[in-house]
Structure formats: structure tokens, C-alpha cells
Image (cartoon, rainbow, N blue to C red):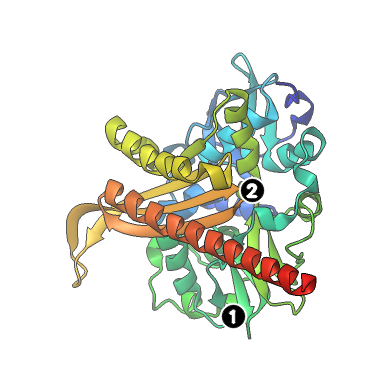
Amino acid sequence: MEHKIDELVKVEYDTIQSDETVKDAVAKFAKDTRPRTLLVFDDENRYVGVVTERIIFRSGNQSDHTKVKNLAVKAPKLEKDTDIFHAAKLMLDSNMKHLPVFDGESILGIVTANDVLMKSIEATNIGDLPIRRFMSGAPRIVQADEKIATVMHLFNEAAISRVPVVKDGKPVGIVSKHDIVTKVLVSNNTMSFADFDDRSTLLNNGVDSIMGYPLRTLMPNDTVEKAISLMHERSMNSVILVDAEDKLSGIVTKKDLLEPLAAIVSHAQEQKRFIQLRGQANELEPHIKAEVINEFDELLKRHEEQIGEGHAFIYVKKHKGRLNKGKTRGVDMYYIRARISSDFGTFVASNEEFGVVQCANEVARLLEKQMQTTLERMRDRSKGEDMLGVRAAI
């Protein structure tokens, strides 16, 4: 498989020393409007890992004096001859949009999701497709006067990184974890989430005080190439889609567009169905993980005739369940969000349950219900067209 990443490697990248603090990292992120990844090196200039805004956001109650080395994670290592499709898959697996490239033990630079997507226009036909093929319809939204605290809770509960801000049904901005880290933490003297609670003056401000605007929007029938080019030019991680009346139609993210590239890896291995688990799925016991995969594999198999080669992308998040009075129940609760992309359509469903297999079962049921509804709608439309043909013949 050609289309290697060697020509995409950026030799200039952002770094931080392992003994620097979270406060130092946030200050670096705040200097630029682009969401970034910092490569972490120790005092002997040895690569330690990476730290991202998402990692800092999830660290929550860490002190601003916490050393970066305590938060750094090992990102997948790319090599010069890695192709863009495997790079896309590794970006999705690790939930990172910047990955380091190595030659043996020596770091050469980084490759970004931006560059992989731009290369995909040349390497595949994805750029010619309508963006609606990959958009998430009916996304989570917040009102312009919604509290910042509410949005922070939404990011954690729904496992999302950004959300459109709407007023009178029309999108007026977008708020992301990048905005929270660089505008909320920077405004706090200690730069620590630990010092915040829902009564904080800052967190009671409306989300419109930190949202990104004005928006650059597209329409669902615009091409993927147009969306990728816009994200590349504007350093955006997503594009909001609107209808002819400027009402919100959906949102498409870089992750949404990396998914079909990652699926090409399975095509090369002659797999008809492609299923990828992300998030905390790797923490599952192997037999449990296999049950979750099988749940969605069976769903794709049942509808293979309608959807053809289906691609399922499953995000798993685990947390401790709580009783009504807020006490920890002590049993793991799972949140699963699944997305199926196919020529037949795109289907998205999510659910939260005690027990990951039960949760996967319910999400699969919701997806199947959507598929059946779409199929019935298509059949009704076909019948209507047949009736019109009969009347015209008469």
C-alpha cells in the first residue's frame, strides 16, 4: 500500500520538559489558537511521551504544580514508511491528532491529522464525496447563555470534545475543550480545575463568552475536499453544517473523516466488515471485548445485503455508577457511542448501562431500529414512485 507519510513529516514541533508543570503546559497551549500536542522530553533530551489539552482536561483535579511527566502518555510511534491509512487508524486508536515519527530511536518529527486528510484527497476518492456521508446529524448542542460549567459536565458525560452553540435554532459559535483549557484555566490564578466548582463566578458565565466565532459553515452536499481544505486553512478540528435557512444540520470532525481512511486497512486485508473500538475498550477483558465486537459484527452481518461493507466505530467510556443520592454504587457503568458508516447511510447511537455487554446490546438495538426505519422509508418512497408511474401510464 503506497501513500507513505514520509513527505508529511513536520520537523518543527512543540516541546516541553518533563519537569515543567501543568501550568507551563497550559501557558504554551494558550499562546496559539491551534489545539496542539506537546512532545515531552527529559533533562537528557530523551523522548518521554506527549501531553495534550484533552489529557489536561481529563486530569481534572490535578494541581497546577503537577509535573508534566506525571501526565505524559506514550503515543503510537510512526515510521517513515507508514502509510496514511495505518496512520489514520493509529490516530483513532490513540485519540491523538499528532503522532511522532521515528527512525529507530531517533525522532524525526510529527505527522498531523490535517496532513493525513489533505493527502487522502490525492490518495482516494473521499474528496469527491458529499460531506453528509460522514456528518453526525442531530449533534449535542448548547444555548448561547448556557453556563460554562454545564458545558464542562457535558464534555465529560458525553465524551465529546466540542459542541455547537445555537440561538433560535441557528449556530452562532462552537466551544471546545481547547477553549476551556486556554480561556478558563488561563483566567484562573492557579490554573487548576481543583479550585473550581459550580459556584465559581467564571463557570457561571455564559458559554458565548469563550466560544469560537464567527463560524465558517458548509452545507451537507458540499464535498469532503471542501471541508478538509477549510479545516486545514483555518486550523479547525470540525465544521458545522447548515441547511438553506442556516439552521443546524450536523457537524463533521476530523475523526469522522479519519474513520473511512482507517477502514481501508481492513479492505486491504479483504475484510468485509470493519469494527474499531476506541476509548477505554482496551481495558476490557479479552472475552468481554470479543463479545462487544461480536454484537456489532452480527448487526453488520444481518444487514450486509442493504449496507454492503459496513464500518462500525465504537467508543467506550467507563466510570463508577452512582445512586440517586449521589453515593458511588461501586459498580462500573459504561457509556458507549457507536457510529456505522455505509453507502446505505450513517447511523449513530449511544447508551449508558451497568455492564458493558448490556450497554453494547442496547446500542446495537438502537442502531438496528434506525436502519429498519431508513429501509422502510426507502420502500415507501419506491412504492410512491411506482404508483406515479402507473398513473402516468394510464
Q: Which mark is residue 343?
A: 2
Residue that extends furthest to the top in the rendered view of this protein: 104
Is 329 situated above or below 294?
Answer: below
Tell how many labels.
2
Q: Can you give x and y, in whole percent of width and height, for residue 253 in the image?
A: 64, 54
* Quarter where residue 104 is shown: top right
Q: Please state which of residues 174 and 383 is positioned toward the viewer in this rendering.
A: 383
In-image side of 321 versus 51 (left or right): left
Q: Can you give x and y, in whole percent of width and height, for residue 30 in the image?
A: 64, 56
In-image side of 113 versus 360 (left or right): right
Q: For mark 1, does the 10 Å Cα neighbourhood hold few (<14), some (14 to 19), or many (20 or more) residues?
A: many
Q: Give the residue displayed 55% in from the left and 72% down from the top.
A: 141
Q: Can the viewer see residue 11 in this picture?
A: no
Name the N-terminal-most of marks 1 and 2: 1
Q: For mark 2, does the 10 Å Cα neighbourhood hold few (<14), some (14 to 19), or many (20 or more) residues?
A: few
**Which three-letter amino acid code belongs to the residue tagged 2?**
Asp
**Which three-letter amino acid code belongs to the residue tagged 1?**
Ala
Which secondary structure, mark 2?
A: loop
Q: Give the residue displayed 34% in from the left and 36% down from the top.
A: 289
Is 32 situated above or below 207?
Answer: above
Q: Which mark is residue 144?
A: 1
